Image: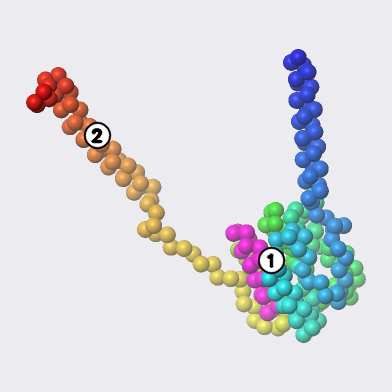
Amino acid sequence: MAKLYRIITSLWLTLTIVFSLGISNANATGVYDMPMVSAGEAVWVVDEADTLSRATEAKLDGMFDQLAHSTGTEVRVITLRRLDYGATIDSFTDDVFQKWYPTPEEQENQVLLTLDTLTNRSGLRIGASLQNLLTPDIAESVVKETVGYALKNQQYNQAIVDAGDRMIAVLSGQEDPGPPEIQELNIEGTFSTAEETDDGIATIWVVLLVILATVIPMVTYFWYVGFPGS
């Protein structure tokens, strides 16, 4: 009976592992899962992670469409829930960029921003003719600061909109507005320090011990002698 139980348990664990791996692979997103988008096509947002609101998508569509008409520069955004096994956000971005824009001529005026909601990492690929505007330093700041700051609180909509606003400004020839200012909260005086907490606890214990030292002898005395009036 014990042997049969061990066999059933082993089979159950095996099936659980296989089933879990199957679900993980099913939810993963690879380059082959991406719809084909060509240069010049008015598709600006591919929200595979289903994490952007309709209002955000509409805003991004309007921003990127206006940029394309005024400058010829095309910015597109991809969100996904998780990457395929072995892929990184940078390799995924590069692969999709190459799939969508296979020739150097098609790649020149293209920008692709990707976001993985599982790891909260983003990737950015920029066409050769735009790298004098969207320089490597600015690109790194967009990924790590503009997008990264909002992702700390899982503010995906804000992260993409902020990144879009900043890139559009730079790609339109305006001065780089830089990353959003980080507002530091002043919590001084709101929470007790460790030393203050320890001092407070020590004071409470002293008060309790004084009370007990006073009350216990009195109760003991009257217990044996008798309470007044009894």
Residue at (21, 35) in percent of width and height? 211
Q: Quadrant of the C terminus?
A: top left
Q: Amino acid at mark 1?
A: Ser
Q: Which residue is mark 1?
A: 53
State left or right for residue 105 relative to residue 78.
right
The mark lying in front, picked from 1 and 2, is 1
Of labels 1 and 2, earlier in sequence is 1
Question: Which residue sits furthest bottom?
Answer: 70
Q: Residue at x 9, y 26 (%)?
A: 228
Q: Is residue 167 magenta?
A: yes
Q: Which mark is residue 149?
A: none
Residue 151 position, x and y percent, is 63, 61
Give the class, few, some or many, for how many residues have Cα within 10 Å of label 2's Cα (few <14, many ≥20). Answer: few
Residue 8: x, y in percent? 78, 24
* Circle 1 Cα neighbour tier, 10 Å, few/some/many (<14 / 14–19 / ≥20): few
How many numbered discs? 2
The secondary structure type at the circle numbered 1 is: loop
Residue 98, percent from left and from top: 86, 65
Magenta-tinted stretch: 150-169
Q: Quadrant of residue 12?
A: top right
Of the pair 1 and 73, the residue shown nearer to us? 1
* Residue type at numbered disc 2: Leu
The residues bearing labels 1 and 2 have C-alpha atoms spaced at a distance of 60 Å
Which residue, given by chain and number where applicable, does mark 2 sit on? 209
- Quadrant where the N terminus lies? top right
Residue sitting farthest toward the right:
103
Asked whether the viewer can see residue 43, the reply is yes
